[in-house]
Structures are given as C-alpha cells and as structure tokens.
Image: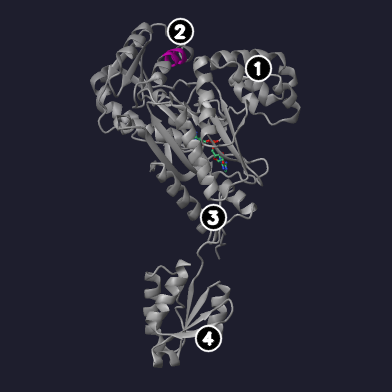
C-alpha cells in the first residue's frame, strides 16, 4: 500500500480563508476607492523579473538582495548551438574546443567562453540593453580572463553582442584592447537569472521605461496590489509570501506637494479602514550631492567606535554605513545617538525640499514625527523617506514604508525622472486592525432556504435565483432535509433569515420568512418577500 502524505503550506506562507478573505477584499477594495479618488490607476506587473532589475535598484549589498531572494536560472536556448549556427560557422577553422569558463565575481556570468588555438577568447553577452553594467563587465571580463589564463599575454578578448553597442562602449573597449563583434542571434533566447519580486517599485519603473510612459501627459500615478516574496525568518507579522498595496508617482516634478499628497492619501486610507493607532515618521536622507559627503563622515566616526559595535554593524561600516543607523541592538543605541546626523549635512536644495514638505504636511493637518535614523533598507531612496508604524504588532510594527527615488528610472536605463511612492503591508495592517477591535462586520449569509418535499423544490430554486439577483447571499441546500435539521444548519451558518417552503406554502403560493435572531415569522407572497429582503439588505 502506498503511504499517503499530507501536504502543508510552506513555512512563511499561508492560506487566507473565509471569512478572513472577506476582510482582505474589503481592505483592498477600500484602497482602490481611495487611490482612484486621487486619480491613481492600477498597474499589474509580473511576479517575477530578471534578478538584475532588483539588484540594480534595491542594491546588491542590501539584505533583500544578498540574503532574501527566491531566484533561479532559466536555461534558455543553448548558446553553443546558437553560436555554431552563426558566428562559429563563419570562424569554424579557428575554433578548437570549449574550455573552462572564467568565474566572475558578480552574477553576470557570460553564457560561454570559447578559446581558440589562436589564443582568441569569445565571451558571449546576455542580450540586454548596453548599460553601465556592461561597461563595468568589460573591465571585469578582461581581468578575469587574465587571472584565469595567466601567461596568455597574446590572447585577445572578443566580445560578441547581440545588439549594437553604444559609441561609448566601443571606445571603452578599444581603450581596453577588446574587440567587439555584433551578431544578430535570431531565435536565440539567452539564459536568464530570474527572481520572484521582493517588492514592486523596480517593476513599476521597468514598466514605465518599457512603455515610454514619460511621454504621457502629466505625472504617472500608479497603484498595485499583490504578493511579494522575501526569504526572511518567519515570525509574527513576517512572512515569506506577503502582500503589499503600493502607489508610485513618476514624472518630471519633485515638488514636495507630491510627497505630501501621497502621504495624505495613505493616511486617508488608513483612517477609512480603521487603522488609526499609527505614527508617521519622516526624514530626508539627502541626494547625490550631499549624501556621499555625509556617508564618508559617518564612516569616519563609525571607524572610531568600531570595536564597540557588533559584527553586523562592523561589516556595514564598509558596505553601507547608513544601515548602521537601522540597528535595534540595545548596546549600540547610545553610540548611534552620538553619530553625525544627516539633518545637519543636507545641501541647501535638500534642506529646502524637506522644509517645504513639512509645511505641506502642516497645511493638510497631517501629524508626523521626524526620525533622523529612518534610512530604510533599500538603496534607491533620495531625500524624503517615511514609515508608518502601528500598535499591536510587536517588533514587526511597520505597516507602510516609502520615499522618494529620483534617479532610479535613469539608473535602469530610462530618461531622467523623479519618483516617490510607498507600499503598505496588508498582512500587518489587517492584523493591527483586528487587534484593535476595529474590524468591520462584513456580509455573511443573508438567507437560508429551508425546503421540504419535492413539490417545493422548483419554488426554492426559483426564489433563490431571484434573491441572488437582488444582491443577497443565499444558501440553497442541494438535498432535501427535515425542517429541524435544515433550520439548525441555517443557525450554524449564521444566516440572518430562513425562507421556509413546505407543502402549505406550495399550496398557498407563499413563503414563510423567519428571522433567526428572534424567531419572528411571517407569511409573504413572492413579491412581498423580495421587497422586504431587498430593503433589509440596504439597511
Ligand atoms: P518595504 O519597507 O521593504 O518597502 O516594505 C513595505 C511594507 O511591506 C513594510 O512596511 C511591511 O509592512 C511590509 N513587509 C515587508 N516585508 C514583509 C514581510 N516579510 N512580511 C510581512 N510584511 C512585510 C518597499 O517594499 C518599497 N517598495 C516601498 C516603496 C514604494 N518605496 C517607494 N515606493
């Protein structure tokens, strides 16, 4: 006998069942209503993308990218055969054998390195826009090649591109003694590293660029609802598949009024869903003019106290000193409190932007607290950053995070663009609403149809359909039951009314309507029944 295995949801994921799912729908529906009243439109992006999209935006050194990605490689078309069909055919006489591949430090491995007897090496690039990463790679490929094939001083490095490289790349290649050949690899699907999205801002920027949305009139105001994936250690209010509702504004303006309106919309939404015991924290982390100088100063000060910091913070002094400010370790707190503050190092433009933002928030009656340590765990932020915390969640109490990311679209190969947005954690928000006792009473079963005797069945089917068409939730038992049992089930299902149809009712062409809360009962004709229950629904 084969042993039967019971399956369970993977750790860090969960099922959302009725009636909880009704609360989720209500939460998301309310977000749509509020966001659309601010003229935001919904964008739906895929839940997986190229891993490089996330690495280039969120930052390779962040926890999300370095530890928490669900990623895998797609095989694509074998590049060997593709090359054989194209370039190799042309150069067949020069080719010898496929040799070992150099190992590259970053994830952007070429698909194949072929060495020829003549000391020529072919590096095949993945098809993608020729960008900063490609330029960096030329240097890296050259270095890796030299390290792995020492003594091959006469070896030439030949880069094969599937697309025309820019003039800049050509010049850079020439300066590095690298030859370039462009091939049209028709039918070739490159191998790709893909990842489940850990967040959606990068995807929204990718879509903005891909669909030329900068050419559309006005700012692009987009919102999204859906699951995100991070391989974090599961705990209360922290999941590996969790849900976000996010909003982004992309366009030419970085007016602080946009930041303020986005925050107003967020708080109007939280208010509408009863998430009221919250605190909004704001900060400005400067821009590319003032932040590098501040970070250097911070690094210097951190080096002075390095011995008193724990391992994570010590490492971050090198990789990302700003993240030390995020530390929650009690012993580090007095040290961090004495570090230089970004607010004292903002350039004039950033300082003015932050002052104006606070003015705009005051104008809207929005309460906030400044928190100079709010640097956030993603690298793309400039200037405004913010977070909303809620009560009742323990250590995972951030229900929303966001900020400005001017320059991110450009970094991803798009035109100069300003951006700001936020993402609400749905799981945590709903948990907090439940714990505060603010959950609304939603829907539920309105009518249970208790029928008995075959003669009453057609009337039961017909009235169920009419009540459902009128917008009521109706349960029609598929099999005949004794009245006592049937009404018992109606009670257990939490129905508000039972419509009873038996021999008497069929004979008199009426229905008995019973209010289950108090047992009150009356006989009604079909028209009266529909009218009565419809008016009940509206109450
Ligand atoms: P984030 O701060 O990484 O920002 O995530 C936003 C919210 O998602 C958090 O405040 C939290 O409520 C929720 N969240 C994050 N991780 C988990 C988890 N493992 N379990 C449950 N909830 C979680 C972003 O994602 C940015 N994309 C926000 C943004 C949009 N910035 C600009 N535009």
| Residue at the image position 54 percent from the left and 45 percent from the top | 270
* Of the two numbered discs 2 and 1 in the rendering, the one whose residue sits closer to the viewer: 1
Question: Can you identify the residue that label 1 sits on?
Answer: 340
**Mark-to-mark CA distance, 3 and 2:** 59 Å
Tell me the tag on residue 151.
Answer: 2
108 vs 262: above or below: above
Q: Are marks 4 and 2 in contact (CB under 8 Å)?
A: no
**In the current view of this chain or complex, which residue is farthest to the left?**
90
Instruction: Kindly report the distance in space between the C-alpha atoms of the residues bearing marks 4 and 1.
Output: 76 Å
Where is residue 181 drawn, in percent x and y? 28, 17
- Of mark 3 and mark 2, the one earlier in the sequence is 3
Q: SS at mark 2?
A: loop
Q: Quadrant of residue 131?
A: top left
Say the numbered circle drawn on residue 186. Answer: none
Q: CA distance from mark 4 to mark 2?
A: 93 Å
Q: Secondary structure at mark 1?
A: loop
């Amino acid at each position: 006998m084969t042993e039967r295995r019971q399956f369970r949801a993977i750790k860090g994921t969960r099922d959302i069942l009725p009636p909880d799912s009704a609360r989720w729908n209500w939460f998301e529906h309310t977000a749509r209503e509020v966001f659309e009243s601010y003229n935001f439109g919904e964008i739906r992006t895929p839940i997986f993308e190229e891993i490089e999209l996330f690495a280039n935006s969120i930052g390779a050194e962040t926890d999300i990218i370095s530890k928490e990605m669900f990623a895998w490689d797609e095989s694509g078309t074998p590049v060997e055969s593709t090359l054989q069909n194209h370039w190799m055919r042309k150069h067949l006489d020069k080719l010898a054998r496929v040799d070992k591949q150099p190992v590259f430090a970053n994830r952007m491995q070429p698909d194949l390195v072929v060495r020829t007897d003549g000391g020529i090496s072919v590096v095949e690039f993945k098809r993608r826009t020729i960008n900063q990463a490609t330029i960096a790679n030329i240097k890296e490929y050259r270095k890796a090649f030299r390290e792995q094939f020492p003594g091959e001083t006469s070896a030439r490095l030949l880069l094969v591109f599937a697309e025309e490289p820019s003039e800049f790349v050509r010049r850079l290649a020439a300066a590095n003694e690298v030859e370039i050949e462009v091939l049209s690899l028709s039918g070739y699907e490159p191998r790709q590293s893909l990842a489940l999205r850990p967040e959606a801002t990068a995807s929204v920027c990718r879509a903005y660029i891909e669909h030329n949305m900068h050419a559309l009139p006005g700012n692009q105001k987009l919102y999204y609802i859906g699951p995100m994936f991070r391989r974090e250690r599961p705990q209360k209010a922290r999941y590996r598949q969790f849900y976000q509702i996010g909003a982004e504004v992309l366009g030419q303006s970085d007016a602080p009024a946009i930041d303020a309106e986005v925050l107003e919309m967020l708080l109007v939404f939280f208010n509408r869903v009863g998430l009221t015991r919250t605190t909004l924290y704001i900060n400005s982390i400067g821009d590319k003019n003032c932040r590098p100088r501040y970070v250097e100063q911070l690094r210097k000060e951190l080096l002075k106290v390095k011995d008193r910091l724990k391992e994570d913070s010590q490492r971050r002094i090198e990789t990302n000193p700003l993240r030390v400010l995020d530390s929650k370790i009690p012993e580090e707190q007095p040290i961090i409190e004495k570090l230089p503050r970004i607010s004292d190092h903002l350039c004039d433009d950033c300082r003015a932007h932050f002052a104006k933002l606070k003015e705009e928030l005051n104008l809207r009656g929005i309460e906030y607290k400044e928190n100079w340590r709010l640097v956030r765990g993603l690298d793309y932020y400039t200037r405004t950053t913010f977070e909303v915390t809620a009560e009742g969640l323990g250590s995972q109490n951030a229900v929303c995070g966001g900020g400005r990311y001017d320059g991110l679209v450009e970094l991803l190969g798009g035109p100069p663009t300003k951006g700001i947005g936020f993402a609400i954690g749905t799981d945590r928000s709903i948990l907090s609403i439940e714990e505060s006792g603010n959950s609304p009473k939603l829907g539920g079963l309105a009518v249970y149809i208790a029928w008995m005797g075959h003669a009453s069945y057609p009337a039961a089917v017909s009235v169920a359909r009419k009540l459902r068409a009128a917008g009521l939730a109706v349960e029609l038992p598929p099999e005949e039951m004794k009245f006592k049992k049937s009404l018992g089930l109606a009670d257990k299902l939490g129905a508000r009314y039972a419509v009873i149809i038996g021999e008497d009712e069929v004979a008199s062409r009426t229905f008995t309507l019973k209010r289950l809360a108090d047992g009150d009962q009356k006989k009604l004709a079909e028209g009266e029944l529909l009218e009565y229950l419809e008016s009940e629904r509206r109450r």
